[in-house]
Amino acid sequence: MSVKRGLTFSSLQGKSSQNMLDNAISSIIRDIDAHIMSSHSNGMPACKVDLPVTFGIATVKDSDAQLYIYSELINLMILSEEDGGKGFDPNGVHLEKSDKGVAIVVRWKTMMDDAETRKWRQDLLKSYIRQK
């Protein structure tokens, strides 16, 4: 008769690392959501959010954490709302280099096209400058 080992040290390490990765993703998503809400409230059709490049997870190399976390972020952003994602257009979500390392760019559709958005921003700035 074989005895089941139950919890092992290696499975404990794996669960701990996964929890840390999940917590990092949740924290970054809250930050992205805040940037999206702020940008949208200000009439912007997109936002750019710097992402962390180090994660401090002892059992996971930063390069591995980056690959996993960034992939999960993009998947969550473009996965349909019906499937538990955020439902953004896949063509409107990408990573790019930034001064701090890497950033995620999220673009969404608005009622105004790019030229209208630019004009609206310029008019807003002009009205603000005249008041001062």
Image (cartoon, rainbow, N blue to C red):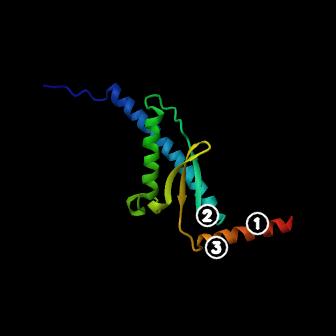
**Mark 2 nearby-residue class (10 Å; few <14, some 14–19, many ≥20):** some
Q: Name the kind of residue labelled 2 in the image.
A: His
Task: Look at mark 3 in the image and give the residue it sits on.
Answer: 116
Q: Name the kind of residue labelled 3 in the image.
A: Glu
Q: Position of residue 88 (x, y in %)?
A: 47, 62
The image's mark for residue 125 is: 1
C-alpha distance separating marks 3 and 2: 15 Å
Tell me, yes or no, whether the two marked residues, 3 and 2, touch with CB atoms within 8 Å: no
Q: Residue at coordinates 56% horizontally, 52% vertically from top-left?
A: 32
C-alpha distance separating marks 2 and 1: 17 Å
Q: Residue at coordinates 46% horizontally, 59% vertically from top-left?
A: 86
Q: Position of residue 104 (x, y in %)?
A: 53, 51
Q: Position of residue 130 (x, y in %)?
A: 84, 68
Q: Depth-wise, is mark 3 or mark 2 nearer the camera?
A: 3
Q: Position of residue 48 (x, y in %)?
A: 59, 53
The quarter holding residue 111 reads bottom right
* Apparent side of residue 35 relative to residue 95 in the rendered image (left or right): right
* Apparent side of residue 65 relative to residue 30 in the rendered image (left or right): left
- Asked if 70 appears above or below 15 in the picture, the reply is below
Task: Look at mark 2 in the image and give the residue it sits on.
Answer: 40
Tell me, yes or no, whether the two marked residues, 2 and 1, touch with CB atoms within 8 Å: no
Q: Earlier in the sequence, mark 2 or mark 1?
A: 2
The quarter holding residue 90 reads bottom left
Q: Earlier in the sequence, mark 3 or mark 2?
A: 2
Q: Residue at coordinates 46% horizontally, 61% vertically from top-left?
A: 91
Q: Residue at coordinates 39% horizontally, 29% vertically from top-left?
A: 13
Q: Earlier in the sequence, mark 1 or mark 3?
A: 3
Q: Depth-wise, is mark 2 or mark 1 nearer the camera?
A: 1
* Apparent side of residue 97 relative to residue 3 in the rendered image (left or right): right
Q: Name the kind of residue labelled 1 in the image.
A: Leu
